[in-house]
Image (tube, rainbow, N blue to C red):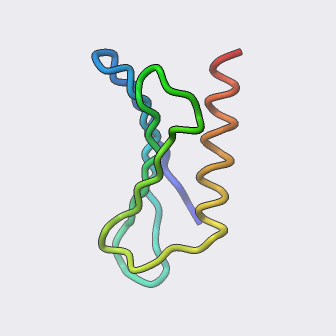
Amino acid sequence: MDIEVINLYDATSGERVLEFHYGEPSTSRDAFAAISIPGEADWSQARLSIDPNQRDVSADLVRFLINFSEKLIAEEST
C-alpha cells in the first residue's frame, strides 16, 4: 500500500500531527489517518484518528502507522 506522510508541527500550540493518506482497497478513493501529540505531551498522550468514512481499518495498518510515527519522532528528537 502506498502511503503519503504529511508531517506537521503547529508552532503556536506545540501540537505535532502526522497525517497519512493511503489508497483503500475497498473503495476507489483515498483514505486518511492522523496521529497527533498535544504540545508539551509525550507519546503516551498521542491520539490516532481514522477517516470517519472508513468502517474499519486493518490492524496491520494501525501497527504500521504507530510504529512509523514512533520511529520518526524518536529520530527527530536525537
User: Relative to the observer, which residue lies in front, 23 or 52?
Assistant: 52
Q: Position of residue 15 (x, y in %)?
A: 39, 27
Quadrant of the image containing the C terminus: top right
Q: Is residue 41 above or below residue 11?
A: below
User: Relative to the observer, which residue lies in front, 43 or 21?
Assistant: 43
Q: Residue at x 59, y 35 (%)?
A: 43
Q: Is residue 40 above or below residue 60?
A: above
Residue at the extreme bottom: 26
User: Relative to the observer, which residue lies in front, 29 or 64?
Assistant: 64
Q: Residue at x 51, y 41 (%)?
A: 46
The total of numbered circles placed on residues is 0
Q: Position of residue 28 (x, y in %)?
A: 36, 79
Q: Position of residue 6 (x, y in %)?
A: 43, 40
Q: Is residue 64 above or below residue 73?
A: below
Q: Residue at x 40, y 31 (%)?
A: 8
Q: Position of residue 39 (x, y in %)?
A: 41, 23
